[in-house]
Amino acid sequence: MTSVDTATSAAVTLEDVYAGYDGRAVLHGVTATIPAGTVTALVGANGSGKSTLLAVMAATLAPTAGRVLRGAARRPAFVVQRSAVSDALPVTVRETVEMGRWAERGPWRRLTPQDRAAVHTCMDRLGVADLARRRLGDLSGGQRQRVLLAQGLAQEADLLLLDEPATGLDADSRERIMAVLAEERGRGVTVIHATHSHREAAHADRILRMRDGRLVEAGDAGM
């Protein structure tokens, strides 16, 4: 069950959440509170349940038991890993980022001048404005991940969820992405990102550590 609780200062509250795919259990009784306006690093090895937990918080996967309460009525922005996006998609960088405005306008609706300005600002922040006419599938891994993050920012959501946004990227791309996440926190956005990296996790305010689909540790990043 997923619902919205606008009376709380928590961005997301998870209450004994279970979830999985095709009858296979992945999450086992996850309970946690994510304070609004913070950056939370979701840490764990491959297969620990990080991506599944993000999908549950994004409401793209329904829990099989438990509750997910979100503190804002607006739809979260969910940025997937670049490997989850097919190279065969016939879309340009600009078109990809413009899809982030669909949450406001609906699919294939004509964008307003304000929408186009927001799209350009997001591309500029991620350093991909000069790639606007390139096909998404022709980009390097770092470029593609920055485009996907620009698409997430274009949604102007209060909750930004990212699945390993900097994994496998060059140092410049990692630093730019971490800087943008810090800027979003400064704007009052709640950011939750999955990562393997202790260095990336150190930039967060809080850490949730996953193991075998269970939350085994939660606390400040300096714990």
Image (cartoon, helix red, strand yellow):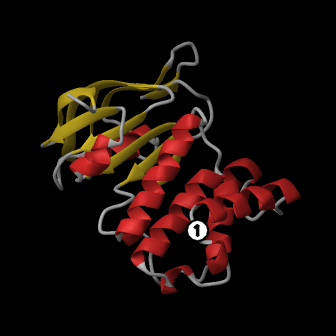
Near-viewer residue (129 or 210): 129
Q: Residue furthest right?
A: 113
The local crowd at label 1, few if under 14, some if 14 to 19, many if 20 or more residues have their Cα within 10 Å, is some
Question: Which quadrant is home to the N terminus?
Answer: top left
Residue for badge 1:
127
> Percent from the top left, x then y, of residue 44?
19, 46
**Is 97 above or below relative to 91?**
above
Residue 107: percent from left, percent from top: 71, 60
- Say above or below: 152 vs 136: above
Q: How many labels does the image show?
A: 1
Q: Identify the element where label 1 is drawn.
A: loop
Residue at coordinates 53% horizontally, 24% vertically from top-left? Answer: 71
Q: Is residue 122 visible?
A: yes
> Residue reaching furthest top?
7
Q: In which quarter of the image is residue 27?
A: top left
Up/down of 208 relative to 125, above or below:
above
Q: State the image quarter where residue 171 is shown.
A: bottom left
> Where residue 130 sits: x, y (%)?
65, 78
Residue at 69% over, 56% down: 102
Quadrant assignment, res 169: bottom left
Foreground pick, 146 / 223? 223
Q: Quadrant of the C terminus?
A: top left
**Viewer-proximal residue among 117 and 13:** 117
Compared across the picture, whether 38 is left or right of 51 comes to right
Q: In x, y percent, where is residue 91? A: 61, 79
Residue 132 lies left or right of residue 37; in this view the side is right
Q: What's under tag 1, amino acid-wise?
A: Gly
Give the residue at x 83% y 63%: 110
Tell me which residue sits at (48%, 73%) in the image: 144
